[in-house]
Image (cartoon, grey):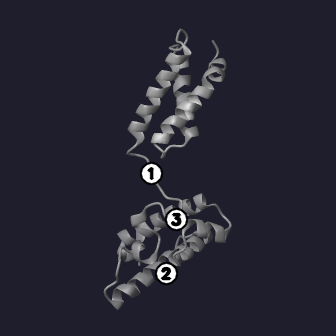
Amino acid sequence: MYFEELIKRISPKLKGIAYKLNGHFSFFNDEDLYQEALVHLWLKFKEGKLSDKTDSYILQGCYFHLKNYIRKNYDKANLISLENSANEEEALNLDNILSLEDPQSSFEIINCKMLIEKINNNGLTKREKEVFSLALEGLTTRETGSRLGISHVRVVKLKSKIRDKCKKYLDNPTLI
């Protein structure tokens, strides 16, 4: 038995299993789960463990493998909304970047503005600066992407990079 023949035979049902499991656990992509099942099958095939097995036995093994894969990776899943930043509590706007929900004094406001200026002028790429300023204006991820002519997924990635760079300044106030 060749691996390609096996995959051709069971692929529709395997995709159905991935789709069914993704219905319960929407933080994985159907195609990602399908690919994970293929990798699992390839490893079992290379070990010679599939030569005398029926298709239903192989599919059941894939089902249990994917359920275990999902269970093990559930805690590692990074759920994000494509409308908002990657983490609602760390939304990329003036107040949340600086962990000040309501600045109490003019000193804090000035310090915040100095920090934003420092971040904006040091270490951000041109595109990150554009995303940073639009996020500070309160635009959503999709609005930012639309205005800059880039995908919302790219905006999410850029915001993550900006957030990492902001954290450097927040963790070390002497850089300001």
Task: Please state if 145 lies on the left or on the right of 173 as rendered.
Answer: right
Which mark's residue is nearer the viewer, 2 or 1? 1
Q: Is residue 38 above or below residue 86?
A: above
Q: Which of 81 and 172 is in front in this view?
A: 81
**Amino acid of disc 3:** Lys
Q: Nearer the viewer, residue 116 or 44?
A: 44
Image quarter in which the N terminus is found: top right
- Find residue 8 and report its horizontal and vertical position in percent: 66, 23
Instruction: Describe the element under mark 3 as helix, strand or loop.
Output: helix
Q: In this view, does 22 lie above or below 103?
A: above
Instruction: Describe the element under mark 2 as helix, strand or loop.
Output: helix
- Residue 170 in which image quadrant: bottom left
Q: Which residue lies furthest to the right in this view?
A: 149
Q: Which residue in the protein does label 2 denote? A: 117
Q: Residue furthest left?
A: 104
Q: Which residue in the protein does label 3 denote? A: 159
**Amino acid of disc 2:** Glu
Question: Which label was assigned to residue 78?
Answer: 1
Q: Residues within 10 Å of mark 3 (few under 14, many from 20)?
A: many
Point 60% across, 69% down: residue = 143
- What is the CA distance from the residue labelled 3 to the residue labelled 2? 17 Å
Point 39% across, 84% down: residue = 111
Point 49% across, 58% down: residue = 81
Q: How crowded is mark 1: few (under 14 residues within 10 Å), some or many (20 or more)?
A: few
Q: Is residue 27 above or below residue 57?
A: below
